[in-house]
């Protein structure tokens, strides 16, 4: 019984530490964004898998903020996720259609990599488009609890830091923090871009 209690206590402490780390990343990202004097050349947003062709609420939240920033800075918006659900349209195209309906003045650039189905390949495709447009400052919009994972993959795709990348967190509900904490812990056994991650993506059906 003592061993069980000790294990639960240790697990709770570790999980709380992960949540605290995620909050610190989101806070620092928001602080850096508020104090930055850089001119934003392009905006991208990390989206969430549609369900039955419909964008989930958290996806609507990040899309809304990304479109507002694109309008504010008078720059294009990148949507870069490929096929994550069966059907004709990619995830990026579904979000692009919603952006066109709600924010017709926003110029949207849709990614061409239909195999991009997770955060790493999403970031890689967004950065490719950004560099193709010769952008020097790139604003990445993401749900606040998702931002810890987002920043990890952006360090992987932009190691030379030849593009300045700023991060803007969008507030999310408590349940999203719990979910993203679990996903962040999974990076230990299934790092971004690994075969293990690919297996997990297949398992949860994040594919066309």
Image: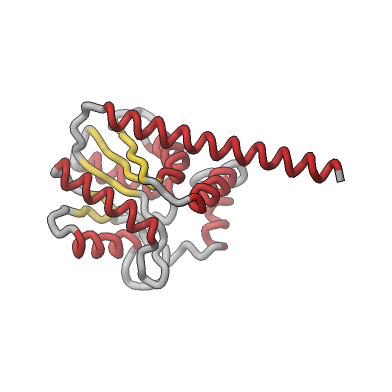
- Snapshot quadrant of residue 16: top right
* Residue under the image location 33 percent in, 72 percent down: 88
Residue 181 in picture, x, y percent from top left: 55, 45
Say how many tags the image has: 0
- Give the vertical position of 35 relative to 44 (above or below): above
Rendering coords of residue 36 (x, y %): 26, 27
Left or right: residue 29 versus residue 34 is right
In this orientation, which residue lies closer to the viewer: 181 or 78? Answer: 181
Foreground residue among 26 and 134? 26
Which residue sits at x=72%, y=38%? 10
For the C terminus, the image quarter is bottom left
The residue positioned 44% from the left and 45% from the top of the image is 146
The image's colour scheme reads secondary structure
Q: Position of residue 96 (x, y in %)?
A: 25, 60
Please name the residue shown 39% across and 65% down the image. Answer: 50
**Residue extending farthest front:** 174
- Name the quadrant containing residue 92: bottom left
What x and y, as percent, mark residue 51?
42, 68
Task: Indicate the quadrant where residue 59 lies.
Answer: bottom left
The residue at the far right in this view is 1
Relative depth, front residue between 109 and 77: 77
Q: Nearer the viewer, residue 42 or 197?
A: 42
């Amino acid at each position: 019984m003592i061993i069980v209690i000790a294990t639960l206590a240790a697990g709770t402490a570790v999980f709380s530490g992960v949540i605290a780390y995620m909050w610190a990343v989101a806070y620092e990202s928001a602080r850096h964004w508020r104090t930055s004097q850089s001119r934003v050349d392009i905006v991208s947003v990390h989206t969430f898998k549609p369900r039955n062709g419909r964008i989930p609420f958290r996806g609507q939240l990040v899309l809304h903020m990304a479109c507002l920033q694109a309008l504010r800075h008078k720059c294009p918006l990148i949507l870069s996720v490929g096929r994550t659900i069966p059907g004709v349209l990619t995830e990026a195209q579904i979000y692009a259609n919603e952006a066109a309906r709600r924010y017709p003045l926003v110029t949207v650039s849709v990614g061409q990599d239909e195999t991009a189905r997770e955060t790493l390949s999403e970031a890689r495709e967004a950065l490719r488009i950004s560099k193709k447009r010769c952008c020097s400052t790139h604003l990445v919009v993401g749900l606040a609890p998702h931002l810890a994972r987002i920043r990890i993959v952006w360090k992987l795709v932009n190691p030379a830091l030849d593009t300045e990348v700023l991060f803007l967190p969008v507030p999310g509900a408590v349940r999203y923090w719990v979910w993203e904490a679990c996903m962040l812990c999974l990076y230990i056994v299934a790092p971004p871009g690994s075969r293990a991650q690919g297996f997990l993506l297949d398992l949860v059906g994040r594919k066309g």
